[in-house]
Amino acid sequence: MTSIAFVGACVPLMADIPVYKMMEKLQQSYPERRDELVDLLGIDLNWHMHQLSDGQRRRVQLMLGLIRPFKILLLDEITTSLDVCVRQDLLKWLVRESDERKATILYATHIFDGLDDWASHLFYLTNEGKCGWQGKMGELEVYQNLKRDNHPSKMLAVAEHWLRKELDEARRTGKFEKAQRGHMEVDPTDRQGGYASGRNIPLEATPTTQTRQGRLSDMMGNAGVMAKHHN
């Protein structure tokens, strides 16, 4: 059986729960690997998730996503919010996973610091969703030229080399980038003005019999709930 792990950019882990209780059975299944990641990422297992900063929450997410040994690992912008040292230590650890366990790691990112010699292969996905270039780093001529010139940020220069052409062409033709999220249906019962689901719908556009349902905090707001409980 091939194991595939995924760690993405969204980190919605904000419940009032200690780290050692998060996916507890998984942590207990791989205690040595868990402890290695805890040390690598600088995690306190007694942290409570709702009290953490974005960077701390990201580290916990990484630990949970990497505990189980994998054959294929998909990473999507996972180093955002990490400090410099943790990020570099994580990248070195991933190299070791690839070299020693022969794991395949696919890393999608816009952050190229420390990646000049990290990747073994490169895949360029164009703005049309097509393959612009793929292959081993040693086969990419523009990269090798930058390496010979001792360029300080080779991967960034390669990305700009490709993306600048797309950007210039888009500006020339007036082709604008499309919104990335799918269509969201308007909530006809929202009376809050519409930053999200309501979209500022006029009251006359909705039937008067419709009533928005939800928790007390949803309808009054947290401040209103606290005031009600204190009265």
Image: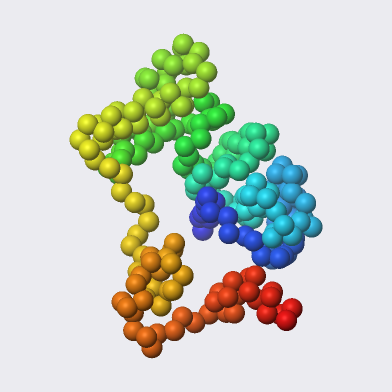
Q: Would you identify the image quadrant in which residue 133 lies? A: top left
Residue 217, percent from left and from top: 60, 75
State the residue lying farthest toward the bottom: 209
Q: Would you identify the image quadrant in which residue 121 lies? A: top left
Image quadrant in which the C terminus is located? bottom right
Residue at 36% across, 52% down: 180
The residue lying toward the viewer, choosing from 230 and 68, is 230
Residue at 38% across, 65% down: 199
The residue lying toward the viewer, choosing from 73 and 193, is 193
Q: Is residue 14 visible?
A: yes
Residue 58, percent from left and from top: 62, 49
State the residue lying farthest toward the left: 173
The residue lying toward the viewer, choosing from 167 and 6, is 167
Q: Is residue 100 visible?
A: no
Is 41 rendered above or below residue 224? above
Report the side of 2 relative to 203 (left or right).
right
Residue 131, percent from left and from top: 30, 38
Q: How many marks?
A: 0
Residue 25, percent from left and from top: 69, 66
Residue at 34% across, 39% down: 125
Report the side of 67 relative to 188 (left or right).
right
Residue at 63% across, 37% down: 87
Q: What colour-coding does the image apply? A: rainbow
The residue lying toward the viewer, choosing from 164 and 97, is 164
